[in-house]
Amino acid sequence: MVKVLFVCLGNICRSPTAEGLFRDLLRRHGLDDRIAVDSAGTGAWHVGSAPDRRAQAATLRRGIDISNLRARQARADDFESFDYVVAMDRENYRDLRRLCPPGREDRLHLFMDFAPRAGTRDVPDPYYGGPQGFEDVHGLVEEASAGLLDHIRRNLE
């Protein structure tokens, strides 16, 4: 079983969106029994909270319900439990580098590195913006998810 952890700042917008979309992608490809998915935040502000209502609405428009997810904070032992710890932006990546135990750096990835044609290295935080920001996040997450899945599949074979 390959295990993937998506990480953003508070675990209520980008990373639960990525968790939901990636889980749906795995289901559609018949890989949900071979790849497990979770999400977390680098900060503890929202621990125990459901995803932002705007993130829920944007994913629900695509037929994906993330309302049952609950925020948690990333921990150093996540680098032992997960094969891929995937940061939504460079700030989260830097925070996770400080948390990462020596010898586990190969597990840390920047999500948009799996979508080099997207023209950005960061999935922008939509929290302080309007609904369009959540739609924009979906486009980036869908593109990077496809690239991540291709990467994992190549390594599974």
Image: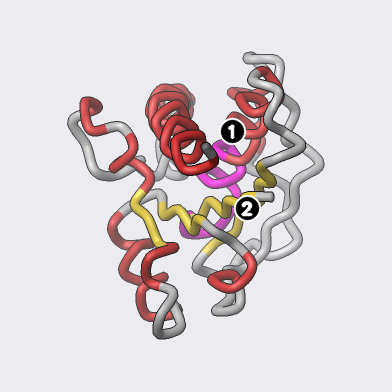
Estimate the x, y position of residue 110 in percent, counting from the top left. Answer: 34, 51
Q: State the image quarter where residue 10 is shown.
A: bottom right
Q: Is residue 79 above or below residue 139?
A: below
Residue 136 left/right relative to 16: left
Indicate whether residue 13 is drawn in magenta: yes
- The disc, 2 or 1, on the residue closer to the chain's N-terminal end is 2
Colouring convention used in this rendered image of the protein: secondary structure
Residues in magenta?
8-18
| Alpha carbons under labels 2 and 1: distance apart | 12 Å
Q: Amino acid at mark 1?
A: Phe
**Label at residue 22:** 1
Indicate the secondary structure of the residue bearing disc 1.
helix
Which residue corresponds to mark 2? 3
Residue shown at 53% from the left, 51% from the top: 6
Estimate the x, y position of residue 111 in percent, counting from the top left. Answer: 38, 45
Q: State the image quarter where residue 26 is shown.
A: top right
Q: Of tags 2 and 1, which is closer to the observer?
A: 2
